[in-house]
Amino acid sequence: MSSARDESSAPVADVINHLVDLGKYPILEPGSAGYVSLVEEARRELKEFGYCLLQDFIGTDRIEGLAAEARELAPLAFHNTLTGNAYLTPQDPSLSADHPVNRTDTTALGAVAYDQIPPGAMIRRLYDSQVFLDFVSDVLDRGPLFRYADPLGAMNIAVMKEGDHLRWHFDQTDFVVSLLVEGSEGGEYEVYPLTRSPEEENYERVLSILQGNREGVLTLDIRPGCLVFFEGRYSLHRVTRVSGDQVRLVALFGFDTSEGTVSSDYLRMIRYGRVK
């Protein structure tokens, strides 16, 4: 098991001891029986279901500290509402109007950019931690991973207030790593595992889900403190509308198998309202 970097930093290592439930998730002991078992089980779940949920990765007595930080940052979020299809691609006029590629819906949410999160914030120190990077690399098993080099999108905090939602969609990346910092009424994470494959788009199945068919759709039990590994390129998923006054806060960690990854100016503009 390897990682992209070897340097260590005492300050960021300290945050692991402070936040992570090390009794349940011994990520400071790579190579130990407990660590190996944890990684193997996470890999098995990812392969079988396309997702893995590590409940209470952040200790239940410690998540409030992260939530308090995120709540203070939430007013900085850039909010946007976008319309598009489930594939995050342009529509295709050569296909019927009811084809999944041509069916559109909205997504509405806010995002706090990486450069708005203070370097001393616990959530940023977790992301910057070599231990965390090593663990994520081991679970995803794609070779060494690197943190995004994007000054805005290396990591961000998704801020979802009443009425916000994510439409049914497939991701354009192979994996997403996230942490639910604070939950809300509504805002349920729904997924149809492995809806399609590299060999078969399964357009009929996708259309059925977009039309409201619930058969095969799962609502994931994601609670505050849960670390989520999700492979969304082949699994259709959404977040239902948030209701009530409590804001849904999710930390999204940017990792890639290539060094120096940055977002396009277009993605920066729609996510953060600026390019730098």
Image: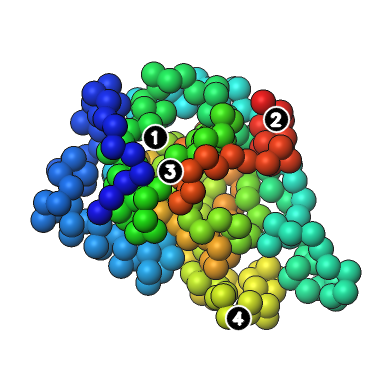
Q: Which residue appears at 83% of the width and 68% of the height?
A: 92
Amino acid bearing label 2: Val
Q: Give how far apart the Cα atoms at labels 4 and 2 are.
A: 36 Å
- Callout 3: helix, strand or loop? strand
What residue does disc 3 label? 146
- Which numbered disc, 3 or 4, marks the residue that appears first in the sequence? 3
Task: Tell me the distance, in whole angstroms, between the alpha carbons under discs 2 and 1.
Answer: 22 Å
Tell me the mark number nearer the camera, choosing from 4 and 2: 2
Q: Is residue 4 left or right of residue 210?
A: left
Where residue 36 sits: x, y (%)? 18, 57
Q: Which mark is residue 275?
A: 2
The quadrant the C terminus occupies is top right
First-in-chain label (1 vs 4): 1
Which of the 4 image quadrants contains residue 125? top left
Q: Is residue 54 visible?
A: no
- Whether tag 2 and tag 3 are in contact, CB under 8 A, the answer is no
Identity of the amino acid at label 4? Glu
Q: CA distance from mark 1 to mark 4?
A: 35 Å
Q: Which residue is mark 1?
A: 127
* Among numbered discs 3 and 1, the one appearing first in the sequence: 1
